[in-house]
Each structure stands twice: as structure tokens, then as C-alpha cells.
Image (spheres, grey):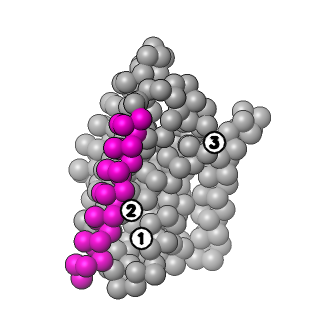
Amino acid sequence: MKELKKSPVTLFLLSMTTLIFLGMQILYFGRASSSQAVFEFGGMFGNYVKAYPSQLWRLITPIFVHIGWEHFFFNALALYFVGQMAEQLWGSINFFLLYILSGVMGNVFTLFFTPDVVAAGASTSLFGTFAAIAVLGYFGRNHYLREVGRSYQALILINLLFNLFSPSISLVGHLGGLVGGILCAIFLPTVVDKRLFAPSKRFLSFLVYLALLGGLLIFSLLIK
């Protein structure tokens, strides 16, 4: 707990995720994993968002909603470890942006490609965080981060292959989080190497993020 206090954003994200999960268990005792419970607590349901664009806040809330104890436990455990590392690398504010923006991109992918599915989970944000650290390790000069980056690349690949054989897991959401994390890794400066990417590359990656996010949103809302 003493170590976690050094990473206030990770502690905040873990606390929010845990409180929301426990709230689901209390209010929907025995039915907390149902589509209705997930939706009522803020899960993504693309067709509903298309019909009611005021529900676009659902691009953020699914990050904190989980479907069952196993889903919650593994994501919370991953956030505990990777969150602390990422927060030390990017600083608290930029890590928060990395986590949320990766999740938002993942949920936009879910909205666009699988609008008929009720989806939720921190995996979109976690995939983005893993991808961002992998990018930092690949382009950076720190030997330790390079080794960690390689291991995360393998972890991402294994998880994506596993997703292909698990229809209940949102592959498109994970891919969206991955794309969001890669772009965020470029335009969000780190604490360890603020000059890793040239300003022009940072600006370009930021524009690509906005264009991809805006394009998928516009097409999603136009195509009923």
C-alpha cells in the first residue's frame, strides 16, 4: 500500500473500478454479470448510443465496469502492476490521459464494429498501456525498458491470439485500445525521456488520434 501511494492515479483508478464492481454486486445480487446490469452501470451498447448520441459518455464509463469476478480480478491485478510502472514513466497526469484515451479509442472501435454487443472492461485501457510501454521500450535507449517492451509485445500478441478463440471477449475493443495506446505513447511526453519523439511526430500522432476517433464516431452516428 505504501508503494501504491506513490502512484495516486493508479490508486484512484483501482478504487473507482473496485467501488463500481462492488456496487454492481450489491444492487444486482446474483445478476451482476447480466447484460442489463452491465448496461445500467455504463457499459457500451453501440446501437443505443447511435439512437441516443447524448449517451456518448459511454465511451468512458465502460472502462470501469466489469462482467464477473474473474474479469474484474485479472484486470484489477494488471492495473495494479502496469499502472504503477506507467505512472512512473509518464507521470500522474499523462498516465491518466494515456489510460482514459486508450479506453475511449477501444470503446469507439466497439461502437463502430460491434454495435449490437454490450461490452465493458478495463482491457481497452490496459491494452493501450501495455502497447505504450512497448513503444517506449522499442524506441527508447533504456536497456531495462527495452527488455520490458519486448515482453509486453509478446504478451499483447498472445492475448490477441487468445481473443480469436474467445468470442465473449471484445477483440475489436482490445485492438482499439492498442491503437490508442500506441498513438498516446508518441504524443504524450514521458518523465524519463521527454525528447524521445520530435515535436512534429507528436503533433502528427495527436492529429491521427483525433481524426481516427472523430471519423469512427461520425460514421457510427450516421450509419443507423
Which numbered tag is attached to residue 92?
3
The three-letter amino acid code for the residue at tag 2 is Asn
Q: Residue furthest top?
A: 143
Image position of 162 (left or right of 126): left
Q: Which residue is mark 2?
A: 107
Say whether marks 2 and 1 touch (CB < 8 Å).
yes
Which residue is pictured at 74% across the width and 39% down the height?
5
**Is residue 141 at least partly visible in the picture?**
yes
Q: Residue furthest bottom?
A: 51
Image location (x, y in percent) of residue 135: 38, 31
Q: Quarter holding the C terminus?
A: bottom left
**Is residue 168 at least partly visible in the picture?**
no
Which residue is pictured at 37% across the width and 41% down the height?
182
> Looking at the picture, does residue 111 appear above or below residue 73?
below
> Looking at the picture, does residue 216 appear above or below residue 36?
above
Task: Please identify the dominant SS of the magenta region.
Answer: helix
Image position of 19 (left or right of 204): right
Which residue is pictured at 52% across the width and 29% down the height?
194
> Looking at the picture, does residue 104 appear above or below residue 49?
above
Is residue 108 covered in magenta? Answer: no
Secondary structure under the numbered disc 2 in the rendered image: helix
Please tell me in which quadrant of the rendered image residue 223 appears: bottom left
Q: Which residue is mark 1?
A: 44
Please tell me in which quadrant of the rendered image residue 184 appears: top left
Q: Residue furthest right?
A: 2
Image location (x, y in percent) of residue 202: 40, 39
Mark 2 or mark 1, which has the lower sequence index? 1
> Looking at the picture, does residue 158 appear above or below residue 117?
above
